[in-house]
Amino acid sequence: MGLDSAQEERYEPRAVSPVAFDATLWDEPITGIGLYTRELYRALGETGLEVQRWGARHTGEAPRGHLNRTGWTLGHLPRWLSERTPSLYHAVSNFNLPLKRTRGVPYVLTVHDLVPLLLPDTVSARFRWQFRLWLARSLEVAQQVICVSETARASVLERFAVDARKLTVVHHGVDHVERVAPPDSTTVKWLDALGLESPWVLYAGALDARKNVELVLRAVERLHDGGKRVTLVLAGQRWFGSGPIEEELRRVKERGVDVRMLGYLADPVFYALMKRAGVFVFPSRYEGFGLPPLEAMRLGVPTIVSTEGSLPEVCGDGAARVGPDDVDGLAELLNTWLSSSTERASWAGKGRARAAAFSWSRAARKTASLYSALR
């Protein structure tokens, strides 16, 4: 379910102000949901809405202080909502609404994905149970639910008894990559010192089992065995269940494959690195949205994704696709693209054209329209 252009514009910003906006990830290291939080908050403010940040550790209009996110949401947030009565409360982290409705304060929930339920081995058992039970309750108490893709919406409807009429798809934007500060001279020197011989291959994301990094490693290894030297750069942090992936990484490196593990990088460094890549590969087995490949596409980097989850929906014809277990197919694509600047330029153009349709201002207008419908 979505909103057409006329519906997007049919709202009165001041009529639904102030909005209490879930900022529990604001003062934490920025993850995908943290980026969503910051960009949607900024874009909502540009529509004319008064949006208050609630639940950040130290900043915003209602900081939680020393309390953890769960304790604040379940123990303190309901009282604050009753006493301060904002126009609505928007929780953005999949399931973190209070367990009961607050009189006069509608709830909006953003669901990004159902990874703990669809791929249970990629999270701890404790988190899996918390996710399942709290999400079920949050879907009950929410008056509106934003799903970040049709894929995410379908996943919710398949697994929970929820009224489909209150689930609306609002895609992310990707134009934030254009606002990232350029790298300073020290960063440029560091990137130059890496000695990456163009064109090289980039994967960006956590070393998460569902991200399927092994496919990239094996495809590059296949090319190495065939006599083609390829440099693979991995940018991302360790994650739950990353042990087997790290073992595979060590095995491939011991065979002489050129793999560079750079870990987590700050935004100016990361996007400067991404712009230099010859090919971006993101073969995830499941994504609720899949922002990294769309970022690469926006920056003009030829992109390959898997055929799973939301990636075909989001990337459309702007990225090439391979099956999540198709080592030969990925190796063949990489060989073709790395050998042809013409092929890379063609896919760079397709990616830019597709990514141009995703903006945070559009996401904010759709979200604001949903807010308006609650009053």
Image: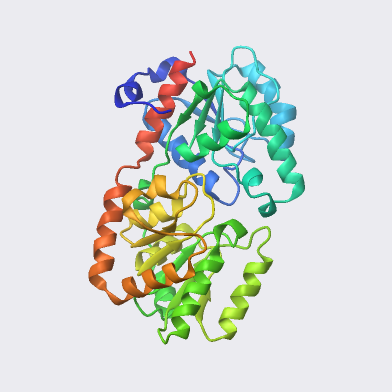
Residue 67 visible somewhere in the drawing: no
**Image-based side of 266 in relation to 98, left or right:** left
Q: Residue at x 64, y 12 (%)?
A: 103
**Residue 321 location (% of width, % of height):** 40, 58
Vertical relation: 350 (above or below) 87 = below
The mark tally for this picture is: 0
**Residue 371 location (% of width, % of height):** 46, 21
**Image-based side of 68 in relation to 5, left or right:** right
Residue 6 visible somewhere in the drawing: yes
**Image-based side of 223 in relation to 243, left or right:** left
Q: How is the image coloured?
A: rainbow
Which of the pair 21/3 is nearer the observer?
A: 3
Which of the pair 322/298 is nearer the observer?
A: 322
Vertical relation: 136 (above or below) 175 = above
Q: Residue at x 72, y 27 (%)?
A: 76
Location of the N terminus (image quadrant): top left
**Residue 366 location (% of width, % of height):** 39, 28
Which of the pair 82/356 is nearer the observer?
A: 356
Q: Quadrant of residue 133?
A: top right
**Residue 61 location (% of width, % of height):** 57, 30
Q: Residue at x 42, y 31 (%)?
A: 44
Q: Residue at x 50, y 48 (%)?
A: 309
Vertical relation: 62 (above or below) 251 = above
